[in-house]
Image: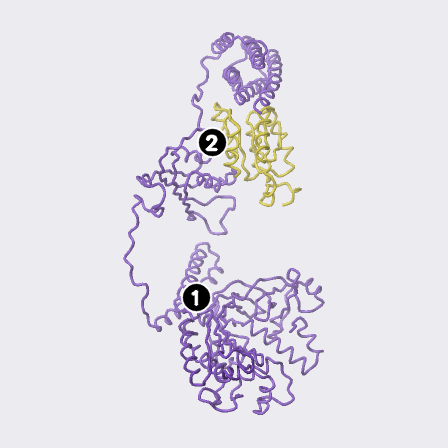
Chain colours: A purple, B yellow
Amino acid sequence: MIDQYKQAFQEEARELLAELESALLELDQNRGDRDVVGRAFRALHTIKGSGAMFGFDDIAGFTHHLEGAFDRLRNGTLAVTADLIRLSLGASDQIKAMLDEAAGQGAADASRSEAILAEVRQLTGPAPAEAAAAPVAAGQTPLAETGVTRQWRIRFRPGGGVLLNGTNPLLLLAELRALGRLEVRVDTEAVPALDEIDPEQCYLAWDLTLETAAPREAIRDVFIFVEDDSELTIEAVSGAAAATPAPAKRAGNKPGGAPAQTAPQSASSIRVSCDKLDQLVNLVGELVTVQARLSEASARFNDAEILDIAESVEQLTAALRENSMSIRMLPLRSTFERFRRLVHDLAIDLGKDVELSIEGADTELDKTVIDQLNDPLVHLIRNSMDHGVEPPAARLAAGKPSKARIHLAATHSGAHVLIRVSDDGRGLDVEAVRARAIEQGLIEGTARLSEAEIFALIFEPGFSTARQVTDVSGRGVGMDVVRRNVEALHGSVEVASQPGAGLTVTLRLPLTLAIIDGLLVRVCDSHFVLPLANSLECIELTGAALEEAHGNHLANVRGEMIPYVRLREYFQMDAARPEREQIMVVDTEYGRYGFAVDEVLGDHQTVIKNLGKAYRNVPVVSGATILGNGTVALILDPHRLVQNIIQTVSLDRRHVGAARTRQEFEGVEI
Amino acid sequence: MSRETLGPATAADEAMAKTILTVDDSASVRQMVKFTLADAGYTVIEAVDGEDALAKLTVPVHMVITDLNMPNLDGIGLIRKLRAGPACKGIPILMLTTESQEARKQEGKAAGATGWIVKPFTTQQLLAVVKRVLG
């Protein structure tokens, strides 16, 4: 390869010499022409530079001196003379001879080179001071490893304009990493407020700890292009890692590298009264509300400094909130485990063989929720033991194993926890429930109800299918207690059953009763909060999209048709619809649904306040929260909202016929 | 950014080979730079001087390597023009200097050069520096 370059240089140098000669001859006619001097200089410069590149060191060395003379002609410290032109032409011939020699044709007279140079020196005076030792250039210094791994602390703050100059500081860090183990800490102290940021400026600095066997020069070499404009310090960490090159990395933060003393194992937990915890959470709740006011006010003032503080407060509040909420979170395990004894004792009393299995006992729930969960669960398990599970003989007759099973499971679902109590007993007989409900006057004999609706009847006060009153249940205090307890926790109950195969009761409970992450939306003048945990995405609802759907309440989300509900229609708000609406797509247990709102305002730490008794029968609202400006926003329960809409549609279908349904909730399909 | 748009090469172009524009009036140096970089997987565009370089910037380039002493438009002038326009804002620009050109080096830096390579250099040195600034 190098021969190929040599060949190219030979040809090029000859062309350049021809150029030099013509320039020299022109210069002889017109000695003041700077442009021609420039041409001659460039020719010499290129011969020198390229010659050195491809191993023509003698030519490069010789040309160097001549180039120096022409440089001085160029900047006017030397005048063009006939002697100089004669000498230069001679030099040109000499270079040609040297090229011939290199190409294996003839030999150049080295003494002649000396003679020409001596004369040039006489004309120009001593050659301009050259940096004899070539300045260190990137990657060009042979840098031997010292063999000893040392630790270096490097502080690097590049100049602000470094990005515009094409430097990528990350590549420099990557290059350091190639030298050894590198710990990187970024310093964002100098980053200004968002509206003052110049995106083309670099505001970052880095504190680096490097363990390497490479010498200091090798580290400096990495920064060679930027060190002039940067703040750069490279310090050896004294004595560190010299003897112990490999492990004990933790010492990196401590000068001297002494291993950190492990503190004596202290108590890993302390007991705190629940009152104190409740008080803490209440205070955090108040803080979150005040913080919302601060953010609102600071956004209004639009002062960079206050915005900055408000943002810090917001972050701290969020962290504090999460922390204090997590203190109140307890795993369900101890609650679940308590039921083993209950099942065991009941099984003996009832003469049944039942095994309790538990799943998801590590699922955490707010302590308040757990405390109030015990009664409903006891009730459900008793019910399963008493009415659900058959005696062993009956089970065997039905082809089931004699040992019955009750399964207790907890899983997360968005901002909720689902707790399932299932048994493999006789299950619920839809017709029996229906007959019993008619008997007790709960429904009309002509009512047409779906299976889920019929099952829901077992939660009605006074409902019981038990043929006889037993010790355990069937005393008229039925499942309605379960529902009431769960609803007091803002939860809901559902029943699924297959006759002969068992019954599953699902309790749907909010993770916490105090504060949630919400998404604040606006419809007309009203604000609503949707739980963030359920929210999937936000899309635009444009006039074009409406047309495309032919008036149906369906939104096309990347090819998938998602039914949506206009909250303004649902809540019957009369105000002009904005041109563009936004749809929040939420995940409910009925699948994905959208809620069309006027505007999605953003996330909101939501302190849940209970609504008064007047609103107890509004299932779609799970509470309210106070916004920064003091107004109240209702917290919506997307699951209940969808449930309610589906029920409305099916009621409409039954009572009014299909006609009205079509216009109202075309998109919502069951 | 589409290929037709004249602007800094972006992450979208990353999948393709990175394009380097080498500007030098010395054919032999150009040849060496081109072969070395092409061998390392880069796409190389050649220009003989600053004017030629500006004319060849019809495609986005990821990096420019330019000599300083050139006819028509020299390296310093080229760097200034490149930095003034949108196409080469923020991309690495390396200049080829000789050890006697300390002042020129500073001038180049002030004009917006990212770094430099001192002539004479070897192919390994060239690749090391290109890697440092281009990744």
* Front residue of this view, candidates A284 and A324: A324
Residue A240 screen position, x and y as percent: 32, 41
- What amino acid type is highlighted by mark number 2? Gly
Whether residue A343 is situated above or below residue A102 in the rendered picture: below
Q: Around disc 1, counting alpha carbons within 10 Å, would you say few (fewer than 14), some (14 to 19), or many (20 or more)?
A: many
Quadrant of the image occupied by residue A28: top right
Give the residue number, with chain letter if any, for mark 2: A139
Whether residue B48 is situated above or below residue A28 in the rendered picture: below
Tell me which label, 2 or 1, sits earlier in the chain: 2
Marks 2/1: CA–CA distance: 55 Å
Give me the residue at 46% from left, 60% from top.
A298
Give the residue number, with chain letter if any, for mark 1: A288
Residue at far left of view = A264
Quadrant of the image occupied by residue A451: bottom right
Say left or right for A659 vs A56. Answer: right
Mark 2: secondary structure: loop
Q: Nearer the viewer, mark 2 or mark 1?
A: 2
Give me the residue at 44% from left, 82% from top.
A347
Residue A361 screen position, x and y as percent: 44, 70
Give me the residue at 69% from left, 69% from top.
A552
Say left or right for A42 vs A579. Answer: left
